[in-house]
Image (cartoon, rainbow, N blue to C red):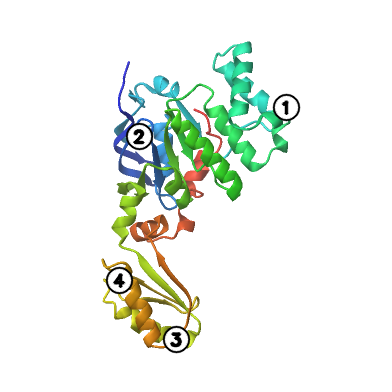
Amino acid sequence: MPSSDIAVLAEGLEKTYRSHTALRGIDLSVPAGTVLGVLGPNGAGKTTTVRILATLVEPTAGRATVAGYDVVSRSKEVKRRIGLAGQYAAVDELLTGRENIVLLARLLKFGRRGAARRAVELLERFELTDAADRPVSTYSGGMRRRLDLATCVIGDPEVLFLDEPTTGLDPTSRSVLWDVVRALVADGVTILLTTQYLEEADELADRIAVIDAGRVIAEGTPDHLKRQVGSERLEVTVARPESLGDAAAALAALGGPQPPAVDETARRVSVQLGTDGLDDVARAALALREKGVATVDFEVRKPTLDDVFFDLTGTGPKDAGGQGEEAENDKGESHP
């Protein structure tokens, strides 16, 4: 039986459709028991990659293994060891939460009593016990996503693919789902997560792969990727718009690697700091005072994944989701 410290491996994955090429040589490696966050702009190839790894689509070229098994030649073995939650909760709204879990557990050969026991376990684990016997149509969006995730782990998968699992959820529901994901990882589950929320990848992922135009263009830990963008930035918001010029001149005197950026609408001037850190900040405060610039905000900001994403792809965070052609291909495919 295959055994490896690498739970998900993709080498040179390509996928060509009649109208376009979705993947142009994707390489990924996910160590067992970790979370890989996959980011990319609309149509970058995120969902296509997940569908290939989950055995829903065959690659045009390249190879991939999941839990040690080839996704094409040993697809049945892969399916026994994975769970997949797509962008849309794949639960029956006419059934209760308990009935959804029991039905799928029976299909997985748990037997009547085994399915009932598994439902009790998962309803408690995903904090759905109080709503267990209510129709899913009465559930909130966050509850449906938790139930969907519960159905994905009925068979204790080794690897779980989460394709934008928190899309459309409010911040509270998203936070609850994050806790569920952390608990799964603590139990040894390997997770590949695509997301349109950059803070989600920052919170959950051990490593991040950025995909653009069907290729991996950057990969590393969140901190490593942030360091590639550059050092900290000083952002100064002035009290009067006519002071923007003086503020920019004062910050330019720091001699940073790039000239200050001026946002007239926000009355803000920002500049990348050098290696002197706090000394640069002290000099900036003194220079602003000498020029008589009154400020309403003075903040040192570290690089974020938003900065990384924009720097690598040239698109803003709002374009990072998978709600385009890839998302359309994923509807109704939540469970392999």
Contact? badges 2 and 4 (CB < 8 Å):
no
Mark seen at residue 39: none
Label annotation for residue 59: 2
What SS does tag 3 mark?
helix
Circle 2 — which element?
loop
CB under 8 Å between discs 2 and 1: no
Q: Earlier in the sequence, mark 1 or mark 3?
A: 1
Distance, label 2 to label 3, CA atoms, is 57 Å
Say which residue label 3 marks.
Answer: 243
Residue on which disc 1 sits: 133
Q: Secondary structure at mark 1?
A: loop
Which one is earlier in the sequence, the residue at label 3 or at label 4?
3
Residue at position x 42%, y 53% from top? 41
| Vertical comparison of 309 with 263: above or below | above
Task: Name the foreground residue: 64 vs 250.
Answer: 250
Question: Around disc 1, counting alpha carbons within 10 Å, would you say few (fewer than 14), some (14 to 19), or many (20 or more)?
Answer: few
In this picture, residue 287 sits left or right of residue 327: left
Q: Which badge, 2 or 1, is on the more N-terminal residue?
A: 2
Query: What residue lies at 63% left-to-right and 20% top-to-bottom?
Result: 102
Tag 2: residue type?
Pro
The number of numbered badges drawn on the structure is: 4
Which residue is drawn at the image coordinates 43% and 69% (left, top)? Answer: 299
Position above or below: 56 against 329:
above
Quadrant in which the N terminus is drawn = top left
Q: Residues within 10 Å of mark 2 (few under 14, many from 20)?
A: many
In percent of width and height, residue 266 lies at 50, 75
Residue linked to disc 4: 279
Q: Nearer the viewer, mark 3 or mark 4?
A: 4
Lower sequence index among marks 2 and 3: 2
Q: Amino acid at mark 4?
A: Asp
Q: Distance from label 4 to label 1 (Cα)? A: 62 Å
